[in-house]
Amino acid sequence: MKTLVALALLLGLVGCRAASTRAYPAAARPATTAALPAIAGPRLAHDVYFALREDTKAQREALMESCRALATLPGVVTLSVGTRAQELTRSVNDLAFDVALHVEFADRKSHDDYQVAPAHQALLAEWGPHFESVRVFDSWVD
């Protein structure tokens, strides 16, 4: 059993490594901020997965546009937003979201300031009624 788990982890890591070196097709390329500034130390990654009550292309695009506006907030190192990769349906893929947001902050203070920033609060007030669910995962990355 331990051998199977180790093999699965190894294959997952190799698959992640291979996927990270591939270029995105133009239509699937995520929106990102400009060139990343040099940041000393780890950054705080803030990943948000939105499930929409009304999952339409128009709703997804509107939400992504609203999220992109947050890229200019102080302390945001990078911001990417996009839709779930419909073609990836392995048993380990979580399919319970429509739009994913990935934000990296320079530090914890930048994250905390972002949470109370008027632009972020306005997005929550506008979009909150449209969410079926919101899941947030925060982690330290280098």
Image: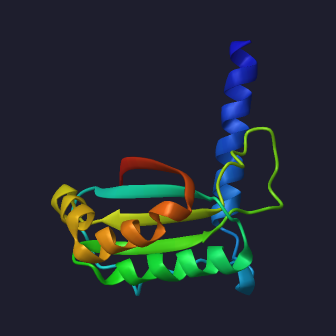
The residue drawn where x is 43% and y is 73% is 79
Q: Quadrant of residue 31?
A: bottom right
The residue drawn where x is 39% and y is 72% is 123
Q: Is 93 on the left-hand or right-hand side of 101?
A: right
- Image coordinates of residue 85 in percent, x first then y, are 74, 63
Residue at far front of view: 129
Q: Does residue 4 sit above or below 79 in this rendering?
A: above
- Image coordinates of residue 15 in percent, x first then y, are 72, 50
Q: 70 and 31: which one is in front?
A: 70
Residue at far top of view: 1
Q: Quadrant of residue 86?
A: bottom right
Where's the N terminus, which quadrant? top right
Does residue 29 appear in the picture of this structure?
Answer: no
Q: Does residue 18 sit above or below 23 in this rendering?
A: above
The residue drawn where x is 72% and y is 77% is 57
Q: 35 and 49: which one is in front?
A: 49
Q: Is 93 on the left-hand or right-hand side of 129?
A: right
Q: Does residue 69 sit above or below 39 in this rendering?
A: below
Colouring used for the render? rainbow
- Image coordinates of residue 19 in percent, x first then y, are 69, 61
Total count of labels: 0
Where's the C terminus, which quadrant? bottom left
- Image coordinates of residue 70 in percent, x first then y, are 36, 78
Does residue 48 appear in the picture of this structure?
Answer: yes
The residue drawn where x is 67% and y is 48% is 96
